[in-house]
Image: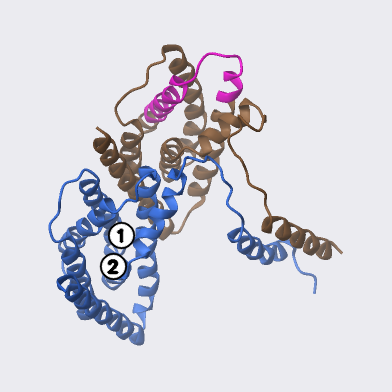
Chain colours: A blue, B brown
């Protein structure tokens, strides 16, 4: 059977994408360390399990709540997180940031575990409140000498993509086993939150 | 026959991708000329490209008429702004990029139902202000025409590709994804404001 050219190209495309992933650094716009700001920012949220689990939980909870929460929560989180990061950048202290992040894991894990369905504004306020702690941590942990804009864009993108991961996983909510799986994921996140609180106190 | 040729071409392309040389994109040192210099200046400046992408997303959400308006007006006003900036040699001290991120990202996130006239004014303003900022640092020379032509060419291509892509999107979730992208731009704008405040 003759294969259409577009089908063949579609098969070659993943190969090209994989090859691109292994390409050498381009050394474009060398700004003495600033150019790597985007990658540093992109890595920052995924370098800590506390950030990863909390942000995926936002996506999971959104998926459990359904429309419009499924997109309102991931829109609200990065915007309020940016406010927190702005505070961090400007040197405004936020006491108990680590506890706030750990508490976000416990509470977001608990709402996923119990499949809590509050009004949209309550869910939005809860997510936004914890976003400030996550943002503040990102804002204060910028490595010296890197481009602030690119760093900021990197961690905003990473945060949004983590929400996307959570929403994608949350699609299993339509099946009974999927609902159970999401609750287990919530329990795991909450228990990890307890661990992080203990770690913060220790 | 065609298929075998395509496989060979794809394999050759993959091998080429695996061993690219460094790009050395600062064209002053490569001698590729002012047009490419201007084009890459735009493509490598997130302060400029992100607001253009935001405007193109907004135009795409609103429809083809808005896309056509942005497509023609934005590069034209950018070109004029570049020359005005070079003529007056004055650059604003306020965070222009952050404000653009907030305004255009916010409009995309809110899926603002703008009239065509408002869209026209916004596109013209964006082009004039950012073009002005681009031109303010440059000294007069004949090669500036080429540099600005390359820069405006980049603006044109980005608006065409992004707005056409968004106009074609039909599933509701895809349009929501565009609005989420707008919220990311707002978040980046807030952070940029923080940076500006930190620098004083």
Is residue B111 something one can see in this rendering? no
Residue B19 within the segment the image draws in magenta: no
Residue B132 within the segment the image draws in magenta: yes
Residue at image position (19%, 77%) is A194
Residue at image position (63%, 47%) is B22
- Callout 2: residue from which chain? A
Q: Do tag 2 and tag 1 residues touch (Cβ < 8 Å)?
A: yes
Is residue B190 something one can see in this rendering? yes
- What segment carries the magenta color? B120-148
Residue at image position (58%, 52%) is A25
Res A123 → quadrant? bottom left
- A71 in relation to B192, above or below: below
Left or right? Give the position of B164 relative to A187. Answer: right
Q: Position of residue B94 (x, y in %)?
A: 29, 28
- B52 in relation to A71, above or below: above
Residue receiving disc 2: A62
Q: Position of residue A132 (x, y in %)?
A: 20, 56
Question: Which quadrant: the N terminus of chain A?
Answer: bottom right
Say whether disc 2 or disc 1 marks the residue closer to the N-terminus. Answer: 2
- Front-lying residue, A67 or B83: B83
Left or right? Give the position of A53 relative to A196. Answer: right
Residue receiving disc 1: A74
Residue at image position (49%, 47%) is B167
The answer to whether dots 2 and 1 both sit on one chain is: yes
SS type, badge 1: helix
């Amino acid at each position: 059977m003759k294969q259409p050219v577009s089908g063949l190209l579609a098969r070659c495309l993943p190969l090209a994408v994989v090859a691109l992933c292994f390409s050498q650094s381009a050394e474009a716009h060398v700004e003495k360390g600033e150019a790597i700001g985007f990658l540093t920012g992109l890595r920052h949220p995924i370098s800590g399990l506390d950030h990863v689990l909390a942000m995926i939980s936002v996506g999971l909870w959104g998926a459990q709540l359904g429309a419009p929460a499924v997109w309102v929560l991931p829109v609200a989180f990065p915007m309020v997180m940016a406010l927190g990061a702005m505070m961090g950048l400007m040197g405004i202290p936020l006491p108990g940031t680590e506890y706030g992040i750990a508490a976000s894991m416990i509470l977001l894990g608990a709402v996923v575990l119990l499949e809590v369905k509050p009004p949209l504004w309550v869910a939005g306020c809860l997510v936004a409140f914890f976003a400030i702690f996550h943002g503040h941590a990102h804002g204060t942990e910028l490595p010296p000498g890197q481009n602030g804009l690119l760093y900021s864009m990197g961690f905003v993108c990473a945060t949004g993509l983590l929400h996307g991961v959570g929403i994608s996983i949350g699609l299993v909510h339509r099946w009974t086993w999927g609902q159970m799986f999401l609750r287990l994921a919530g329990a795991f996140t909450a228990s990890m939150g307890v661990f992080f609180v203990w770690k913060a106190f220790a | 026959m065609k298929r075998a040729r395509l496989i060979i071409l794809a394999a050759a392309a993959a091998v080429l991708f695996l061993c690219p040389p460094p790009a050395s994109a600062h064209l002053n040192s490569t001698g590729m000329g002012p047009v490419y210099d201007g084009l890459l200046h735009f493509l490598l400046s997130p302060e400029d490209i992100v607001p253009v992408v935001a405007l193109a997303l907004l135009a795409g959400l609103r429809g083809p008429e808005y896309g056509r308006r942005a497509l023609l007006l934005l590069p034209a006003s950018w070109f004029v702004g570049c020359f005005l900036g070079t003529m007056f040699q004055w650059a604003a001290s306020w965070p222009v990029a952050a404000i653009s991120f907030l305004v255009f990202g916010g409009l995309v996130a809110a899926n603002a139902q703008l009239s065509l006239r408002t869209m026209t004014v916004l596109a013209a303003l964006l082009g004039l202000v950012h073009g002005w900022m681009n031109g303010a640092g440059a000294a007069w020379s004949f090669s500036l025409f080429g540099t600005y032509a390359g820069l405006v060419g980049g603006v044109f291509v980005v608006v065409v590709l992004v707005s056409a892509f968004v106009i074609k999107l039909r599933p509701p979730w895809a349009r929501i994804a565009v609005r989420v992208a707008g919220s990311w731009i707002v978040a980046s704008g807030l952070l940029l404001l923080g940076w500006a405040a930190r620098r004083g």
